[in-house]
Structure formats: structure tokens, C-alpha cells
Amino acid sequence: MKKRLLQLLQENCRYSNEELAAMLGVTETEIASAVSEFEKAGIIRGYNALINWEKVEGSEARALIELRVSPKKDKGFDEVAERIMAFDEVEGVYLMAGDYDLAVFVKGSTIQDIAMFVARRLSPLDSVLSADTHFILTKYKSNMTDMQNLSSYKDERECMV
């Protein structure tokens, strides 16, 4: 029940305890207790609205930056990640396995703002060896949600044989 409760809350954190209880076949008290337990244990870290910023006038630019970094002795990647997390432009930082070490998601008013952030603030950090910036042009799916309603798209192209 606990894993399914977390999945439902991630799907829609606005479900009421009554709705969750009905979906899971338990009491509202059990739901309230489980949610409180998740919050105290740090499993639930907060509640967010999922916004399609592309539909908001004056929306911001976003990018994924792949960083190769030199980890610090005795601190590994944590120290570098903490420094990067402190920047206001940074929305998320992830330790990765593969060709690069950190995936950094950033936002800015424009693509140029992001480029200047990378050039002036991120790349000069002593641990950063290289940075590859990928600008996000369209978000199709985020947090398991179809952001473009592509399933309602009807392909009206004709096939000629």
C-alpha cells in the first residue's frame, strides 16, 4: 500500500485523503498516518504543481548541462555538487554514470543568459573539466505527464500507394 500511495501522490498530490483511501481500500486515518510518516522520514520532500512553462507568456529558457568534473579528495563529487546547487539558476543536479559526471538542469530568461551563466559562473569552477550545454526546446513528457497532449494529435497525412 505504501509504494502505491507514493505513486498516487506523485501522480497528483492534490488527491484528498478520502480519495486516496477509496483508491487503496484503507481508511482516511491510515492515509493521513502514512503521509505523515513519509514526511517525517524525508521520503516526501514537498509538493509541487507541474507547470507547462511553454504555455506561459514570457516563459524562461531551460537547458541540460553535462559536466565532467574532478572530484575532491575525501569529498568526492559532493563538494562540487553543493557549489553548483547554490546557484539560483540551477533547478537540479544529478550524479551520473557514463561519459559525464553531473547533469545540471538550469533556467534563465533567455538562451543567452544560460550561455553566460555557463561561461562566467559554471565553467570557471576549479573542479569543472568540461561542460556540454543542451538547450531544451520542447518538453514532451515530465514527471510522467504528457506536456503536449500528443495522444490527442490526429495524423491527417495521406498515404499514397
Image: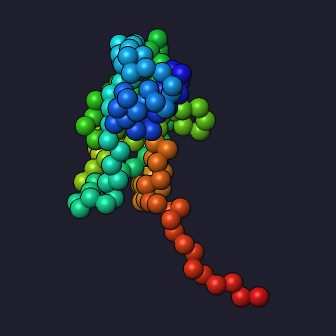
Q: Is residue 152 left or right of residue 62?
A: right
Percent of width and height locating residue 97: 59, 32
Which residue is rendered at x = 26% and y = 58% of the image?
56
Which residue is rendered at x = 35% and y = 45% of the image?
50
Which residue is rendered at x = 25% and y = 37% of the image?
88
Q: Is residue 161 left or right of residue 43?
A: right
Percent of width and height locating residue 47: 32, 32
Is residue 38 visible in the rendered structure shown here? no
Percent of width and height locating residue 139: 44, 55
Nearest the viewer among 32 and 75 is: 32
Nearest the viewer among 3 and 81 is: 3
Which scheme is used to colour this image of the protein? rainbow
29 lies above or below 101: above
Which residue is rendered at x = 48% and y = 21% of the image?
26
Displayed quadrant of residue 14: top left
41 lies above or below 45: above
66 lies above or below 43: below
Nearest the viewer among 77 and 3 is: 3
Quarter of the image where the N terminus is located: top right
